[in-house]
Every structure is written in structure tokens, then in C-alpha cells.
Amino acid sequence: MKRLFILIASLLLGAGLHAQQTNLTEAVDFTVTDCHGQTYNLFEILDSGQAVFIDFFFYTCNQCQVISPYIVGSYTQMGCNMHDVFYIEISYTDNDALCQQWAEQHNVEFPTVGKDGGGNEVFDLYGIIGCPTLVLIMPDHSIVIQGLTQLYPFSAQDVVNAMQQHGLQPHDCNVGVTENETALALFPNPANESVTLVGENFEEVTLYNIMGQKVDTYIAEGSQLVISTAKYHDGIYFVKTNNGETQRLVIAHE
């Protein structure tokens, strides 16, 4: 019944993008798993200092298809989840297979979450009854964009401009996620339960996934740091230090 209500509401409101929104002004925490198996917790991202931009959508939503290129364009302008803003899109009705198709068709590089990963629960938590609905949550957990009205007229630059009004700044996507020749050593690599970093003059270490999304930040003391990798999914990651050294890390659990 809830699914049918969302579909009908979206069709009725499709001619007016400004109509869909959440009534919340304070974020409610959630944990979701995207269609590629990566898990994200809202408050962990916010508490790391990033704002979170949520695009509530579903696969056959015409207006979601219309605005998708502008969302993707603003994602690129805002630094591809590596800087001030973390983008995520969430569907109530679509399974992982459909979400993967959507992401491929619309060139979406940020996390896409469907009903298999808890998307329907987030819709319920935020009272979303129509799509598309766009929500911007600041690191202090306040919701400063509740729908689409703050983004009119709608374009990628309009989305960026709205974020800049809240102190969030554009960044280059290409910073910090390509492997380079450095003195930084990682072992073991591939890592199972933990990885040890050895280098010179680094104080902070940031872990990115293969999509360039920031996963975690660690503070180093001295020339060595041990990172527990048990909680991360198998895959390819990049380790970047504050002095610009970057190395690829493979995590493979036995």
C-alpha cells in the first residue's frame, strides 16, 4: 500500500517538481547498503564533517530521469564525495538489479540504494511520499533543503549555488584518488584483518573506495599506523596521506 501511495503521489505531483519534500528539520539516523554491497551510516558521514545530499527517486519516475543529469553534474562540481558533500540516492521500490541499471544508464558514480539495502525504511523515516525529493543535511544534523523549492530554476549550477549558500564549496574531483610513486609502504597488501602503513612526515590518512568516495580518516602518530580492515568490504581502496602520498590497497577477507 505504501509503495502504491508513493507511485500515485509522484504521478500527481510530476508536473510540479517543487511539491515533494520532507517535513523534518533534523536528521534521523539510518544505515543502508548500496546496490554494490557497500554500507553507509548517515551520522558517521555527518560526524566526519561532510554534509549529505540525498536524492529520493525510483527507476520509472519521469521527473527523476529529467533531473538526474543535473544531480550528477552537481556531484562532479562538488568534488565527487571527497570533500564538503556526500551524495547518495535512495529508492523505495527498486531492487539492487534495477538500481544498478539506473546507475549505469544515468552515469551515477555515487551510492545508489534500493529496497534490498533498506531504502524503503529511509523513505518511511523521512516521510517521503513523492519523487524526486532532494534533501541536504548539514554536519550539525540540521536539514536545510527539504525538497526542490530552494533549487529553482533547476540545473546543476542551481544545486551548487544552493549548497554554497550553506557554506559548502565546489572542489576538483581528481584530487587524491590516483596511485602515485611514494615512499609510503602498506603491508600486508592484500589485507585481511589489518594493514600497516609506514612512511615519513604524515599525520593524517584518508581511505577512499574505488569510486573516489571517502570511507574513513585516521590520525597517525609517528611514522607508522595500523588500520583495522575487518569492517570494510572486499575490494580496491586508495590510501592517501595529508602530504599527498597515495597508494592502492586491496582488502580481501579470508
Image (tube, helix red, strand yellow):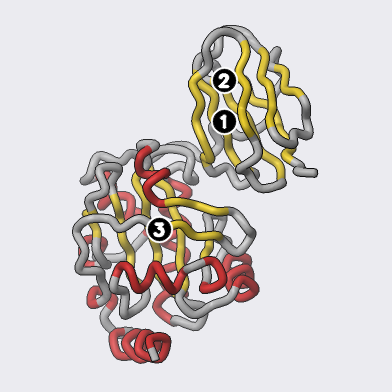
Classify mark 2: residues with Cα within 10 Å, few (<14), some (14-19) or many (20+): some
Q: Name the residue tied to disc 2.
A: 244
List x then y, in percent, for residue 46: 36, 44
Q: Which mark is residue 30?
A: 3
Query: Which quadrant holds the N terminus?
Result: bottom left
The answer to whether marks 3 and 2 mark residues whose Cβ atoms lie closer than 8 Å is no
List x then y, in percent, for residue 41: 45, 51
Given the image, on which type of amino acid does mark 2 rest? Gly
Q: Name the residue tied to disc 1.
A: 176
Q: Earlier in the sequence, mark 2 or mark 1?
A: 1
The answer to whether marks 3 and 1 mark residues whose Cβ atoms lie closer than 8 Å is no
Q: Earlier in the sequence, mark 3 or mark 1?
A: 3
Image point 53% across, 40% down: which residue?
A: 215
Q: Nearer the viewer, residue 237 or 211?
A: 237
Describe the element under mark 3 as helix, strand or loop.
loop
Instruction: Name the mark nearer the viewer: 3 or 2.
Output: 3
Q: Earlier in the sequence, mark 3 or mark 2?
A: 3
Classify mark 3: residues with Cα within 10 Å, few (<14), some (14-19) or many (20+): some
List x then y, in percent, for residue 26: 22, 55
Query: Which quadrant holds the C terminus?
Result: top right
Classify mark 1: residues with Cα within 10 Å, few (<14), some (14-19) or many (20+): many
Q: Nearer the viewer, residue 133 or 152?
A: 133
Compared with 36, 118 (above or below) is: below
Along the horizontal axis of the image, is 187 left or right of 61?
right
Q: Which mark is residue 206?
A: none
Along the horizontal axis of the image, is 16 left or right of 224?
left
Given the image, on which type of amino acid does mark 1 rest? Gly
Given the image, on which type of amino acid does mark 3 rest? Phe
Describe the element under mark 2 as helix, strand or loop.
loop
Compared with 196, 91 (above or below) is: below
Between the C-alphas of marks 3 and 1, the distance is 28 Å
